[in-house]
């Protein structure tokens, strides 16, 4: 496995009335271990993306699991040759993934999961299934599953309205929804069940979990990730996708070769617009 820096991501929806009290201990352990990344703490749970040495990551997981609410959180693990995060942030949030619907509580109810291998077997067998991409438009553009239904949303908060606009005839069809690591689907599955969809499953571990277990079968392109790597391939290796410095749109290689792409200034998505980061 190439790369000396270990990258982990994980989350759990769990009741955290002591959210505020947890912030400083997490800050302290991450400073002590020289970890960088982001930890989000909300009353509904925890979500984290961290990178550091193998020893430091192992020590963090030991610290994390001392709280039984966080024991055995499934981790997405990848490797890089450099630190993909610039700083360490521990943030108090209203939600660990923002949807804006207070009644959606995945710790109490969420949709059933489907294992990546079982999902692949469905696709191998040609079974009827709607493969629903719950991610934002710019993520879908970098890569998605073959024949996936895309919602063309700019923010996860737009997901409920997009579901309302789907064809009523889809509500009794089998649906497998997916996102990067699974967290959005925990909430999205409840939204869909509330909207009357009767057969909704969420891909366990999301795209990254699928890559780990299956590889790239039925996947086209790369997977956008929210760190300096920008995107990874099915082998969980960094790819040549970059982000525009001005507007933060991810850019495929052909877009980087466009005459409208000027490094640190503009890209085909913002050329001619006033999108200065300042």
Image (tube, helix red, strand yellow):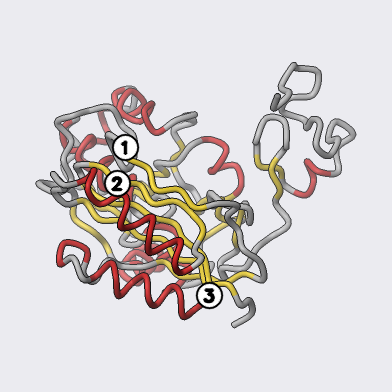
Q: Position of residue 188 (x, y in %)?
A: 28, 40
In the foreground, 255 or 1: 1
Q: Position of residue 48 (x, y in %)?
A: 38, 55
Neighbour tally class for label 2: few under 14, some 14-19, many 20 plus, Cα within 10 Å: many
Asked if the residue at tag 1 contacts the one at tag 2, i.e. Cβ–Cβ closer than 8 Å, the answer is: yes
Label 2 or label 1, whichever comes before in sequence order: 2
Instruction: Report which residue position mark 2 lands on.
Output: 41
Cα–Cα gap, marks 3 and 1: 27 Å
Is 275 located above or below residue 16 in the figure?
Answer: above
Label 3 or label 1, whichever comes before in sequence order: 3
* Residue appearing at x 68%, y 60% in the figure: 239
Report how many numbered discs are placed on residues in the image: 3
Cα–Cα gap, marks 3 and 2: 23 Å
Instruction: Report which residue position mark 3 lands on.
Output: 53
Specify the quadrant that holds the C terminus: top right
Say what secondary structure mark 3 lies in: loop
* Residue appearing at x 62%, y 51% in the figure: 230
Neighbour tally class for label 3: few under 14, some 14-19, many 20 plus, Cα within 10 Å: some
Specify the quadrant that holds the N terminus: bottom right
Neighbour tally class for label 1: few under 14, some 14-19, many 20 plus, Cα within 10 Å: some
Location of residue 27 by image quarter: bottom left
As drawn, the label of residue 93 is: 1
Asked if the residue at tag 1 contacts the one at tag 3, i.e. Cβ–Cβ closer than 8 Å, the answer is: no
């Amino acid at each position: 496995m190439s790369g000396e820096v270990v990258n982990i991501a994980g989350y759990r929806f769990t009741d955290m009335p002591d959210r505020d009290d947890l912030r400083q201990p997490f800050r302290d352990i991450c400073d002590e271990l020289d970890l960088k990344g982001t930890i989000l703490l909300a009353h509904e749970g925890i979500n984290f993306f961290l990178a550091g040495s193998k020893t430091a990551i192992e020590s963090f997981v030991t610290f994390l699991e001392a709280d039984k609410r966080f024991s055995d959180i499934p981790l997405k693990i990848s490797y890089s040759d450099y630190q993909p995060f610039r700083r360490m942030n521990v943030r108090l949030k209203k939600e660990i993934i923002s949807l804006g619907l207070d009644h959606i509580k995945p710790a109490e109810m969420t949709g059933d999961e489907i294992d990546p291998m079982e999902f692949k077997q469905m696709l191998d067998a040609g079974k009827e299934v709607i493969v629903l991409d719950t991610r934002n438009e710019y993520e879908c553009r970098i890569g998605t599953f073959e024949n996936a239904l895309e919602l063309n949303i700019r923010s996860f908060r737009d997901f409920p309205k997009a579901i309302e606009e789907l064809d009523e005839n889809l509500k009794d069809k089998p649906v497998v929804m997916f996102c990067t690591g699974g967290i959005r689907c925990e909430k999205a599955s409840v939204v869909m069940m509330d909207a009357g969809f009767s057969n909704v499953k969420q891909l366990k571990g999301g795209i990254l979990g699928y890559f780990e277990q299956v590889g790239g079968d039925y996947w086209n392109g790369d997977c956008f990730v929210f760190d300096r790597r920008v995107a990874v391939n099915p082998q969980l290796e960094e790819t040549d996708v970059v982000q525009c410095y001005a507007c933060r749109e991810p850019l495929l290689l052909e877009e980087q070769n466009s005459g409208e792409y000027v490094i640190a200034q503009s890209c085909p998505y913002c050329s001619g617009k006033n999108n200065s980061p300042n």
